Each structure stands twice: as C-alpha cells, then as structure tokens.
Amino acid sequence: MAISHAILGLNARNYLYIRTLNKRKYKLIADDKLQTKHQLLKHEVPTTILLEAFTSFNDIRAFDWKTLPRQFVLKPAHGYGGRGIVCVGRWDGEKGIDSKGNIVTTQGLESEAFGALDGAHSLNNLPDYAFIEERIMVHSFFKKLTERGVPDIRVIVCNKIPVMAMLRLPTARSDGKANLHLGAVGIGIDMRTGITTYGVAQGERVTYIPDKKIKVGGIKIPEWEKILTIAVHAQQASRLGFVGIDIVLDQTRGPLVLEINARPGLSIQVANNDSLRTRLERVANVRIPSIPRAIELAQKLFADDALSAVEVSDRMLGVIEKITIYGELKRKTILAKIDTGAYRTSIDIDLVHELGLDLHDKLVNVRSGSGRQKRRTAHIRFKLNGREIKTVATYTARSHLRFPIIIGRKDIKGFYVDPAKIPDGVKVK
C-alpha cells in the first residue's frame, strides 16, 4: 500500500479508521465516562479513584456528602467540552471552594448532580449519570507552564502502537480547560524522547506558550516511557482499534488515564507538524506481540530528526534511587540516598569489604555532622538510572544509618533531582 503524505481529514478519519476499527458498542462505552472508569479499573489501568456514582435522583438524595475527602471532582458521564465538571477543594463535609475560588455547598452540589442526570451537559440533552472521583493534584512539573486547570497528554494509539502525541495546556482563554477548541495550547511531542516540538493555539502555529515567555519546544515530559505504556494498556482495555488516550500526571500517583476518546481530533497533526495519516499507514498491517515491542517500534518509526542526537535516558532522579555496585567479588543492588548537600559519594566500610572494592591510598578531608575528618577512599563503579559511573568514594562506618551509600553531587552531573520522586514501595521517614 502506498503511503500518503496528506494531512488526515475528518472524512478519511471516519471512513478509514473509526468505521473499520471502532465497533459501535465499544464507542458507546468510551463516550460514557462512568463506563470507561469501570472498564479501566477492571483491567487495572491506572486512573483516578471512583468515589461515588449517581444513576438516579434517589442516589443523590441518599448520599452522605460528609464522607467525601477534602479534594474531589463531580462529573457528568456524557459531558463534553469540560461542561458540568465541578472541582472542589477544602471540603469540610458541608462546603468547600471550587477551582475559581467560589464557595460550594452540599445544596449546590446536589443541584449540579440533578442537572447532570437531567441531561444539562450531555449532547442533545439526553438523560445522564454523574459520578465523583478523586481530584488530580497536578504534578509540580507543570506549575511554570500553566497557572490553572489540569494539563493532559493526548496519545493516539492504533492497534497497540502509539503513533502521535501532544501536550495540552490550559490557558486563560480556555478558562482552565485542556480543550483546544476552547483556547488551550497543543504542543507536539517527539515519540522517542518525550521532548516537545511545535505548538498550536486557536488553529495557528505558536512559538511560545500563550501568556508565558516559555518556548513550546524543548520541554521534556516526565515518565514518558510509562505514559506510552499506560496509553497502550488503556487502548487494549477499551477494545477500540483507533483511539485517543488522555493522560494526566498526578503529583503522587504519576500518570493516570483521565478519558478515552473514540473520535480523537486532528489538530494534533498541526502540533506535530506531521501527517497522522502517514503514520497510521506505516503501521496499518503491523501486528505486534507485546506492548514493549509496540513502543519500541513507535519510537523508531516516529522519532523527530531534529532530536536524533538526544539521549533517551531519564535524567530525573529522586532522593532515593536503586543502584548496582560492581566489585571484584560480586555485584550488589541497593538503595542509595541522593545527597546534593554532599560533594563526594560515601559508602559503608562493610560494603567495601563485602564487594571487594579497590582501595585507594588517597585521604580526603570531609565535613560531616561530627566535624571535619580525614577519610580513606576506594575506587567504585556503579550504575545509576541506566548510566555507569566510575568515581573515588570515601568509606566509613554507616551500618547505623538507613542507607549504606550516599551519592554526592560530584557524581550526578547531568541529572536533575526531584524530591517528590521515590521508588515504588519505599517509604521516606
């Protein structure tokens, strides 16, 4: 089949992909946010926690609003364009504050829920459902990019392969909603590196984020590999062949699927300066046995030439990281503390002997909590976040401390440290 370089239009999208790849019964599920939520939870795809569902007026009347947490969101199941969504904070069981700073009461929320069931926010005003879910705590990464609303990442997936993605940032014009038709800005993302490329706002190409002095290109999206993996899992759970997966980044839980769109818009092509049709035709007849292989293929096929020299490894470290140390006797994987307050790496003396590390005859001056002291050193080789590092570390007794090694700033050049990032299952005291 010849590959077309024309921009994908609505008619071609509907005829070639939606009609052939998306069965009606699965489109109806995707159109219903509540059914989508149940489907994602059933398949263990990371998503926001469902707190309550209202399918009748009696459900609303009988609900105890005092059981809700301090932060939550009320949504209609078939709402569109961000209509009918009420974000509530500082809830005390009787009242709270919405996203615009207005006071929200139990009576007001009941009224919103009743309106949703009456179809106030659905297409053609058809009867609807409503539900309450946990509120997204926007990742700190986005604080400098947007002042309000919840940014998301739209990933187009076709038959298990992610083919195109963009970051959608709410603006003042879009009233805090990540909807391009309302005035949000869309920014293309390179599939290989997770780095942003081009931008579009109000149908026009932009170089800077509206209201900001920040260029749309060159922004590295956190947890990019995980975002792609979750997007594919969501597409598989939806049973749709061609779909847009909307993912948000939560400060504590990381990437979460917010919505599934069975008819994804086409402005993503302008944001990426590329044809979606071209990309779809390149993978039209490809069948991939696993999700890792699908992502690997997507990153090879749809890499931006201008970013070909960029290393893909994640440069973001947490305060605690798993490292593997290589010694003459054996190698060992342990938890290390990333300490930007220390210049040199320091390792426990028992670990030096256990691994058979090469001792160094150099003594160095070290300032610690007990004052200045001279410490012995050892040659050390370890792998941190995919990068092999060779250095000279000091060693001392650390068996009474929680971490047998601290990594000093001398050995983390080129990395960034996010204090909120910690490995799964590790608790920071």
Image (cartoon, helix red, strand yellow):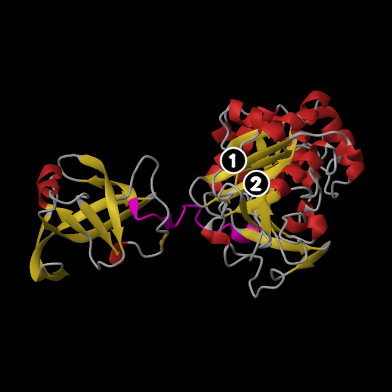
Q: Which mark is residue 342?
A: none
* Circle 1: element type: loop
Choose top left, top right, bottom left or bottom right for residue 409.
bottom left
Q: Is residue 15 left or right of residue 408?
A: right
List the residue tagged with mark 2: 73
Disc 2 residue type (three-letter): Val
Q: Is residue 317 left or right of residue 397?
A: right
Residue in front for this viewpoint, 128 or 95: 95
CA separation in Å, label 1 and label 2: 10 Å
Disc 1 residue type (three-letter): Thr
Q: Closer to us: mark 1 or mark 2?
A: 2
Mark 2 Cα shell of 10 Å, populated few (<14), some (14-19), many (≥20): some
Q: Position of residue 292 (x, y in %)?
A: 54, 35
4 up-or-down from 203: above or below: above
Magenta stretch prevailing secondary structure: loop
Q: Which mark is residue 48?
A: 1
Q: Residue at x 69, y 71 (%)?
A: 208
Choose top left, top right, bottom left or bottom right for residue 247.
top right
Q: Position of residue 282 (x, y in %)?
A: 74, 39
Sooner in the amino-acid sequence: mark 1 or mark 2: 1
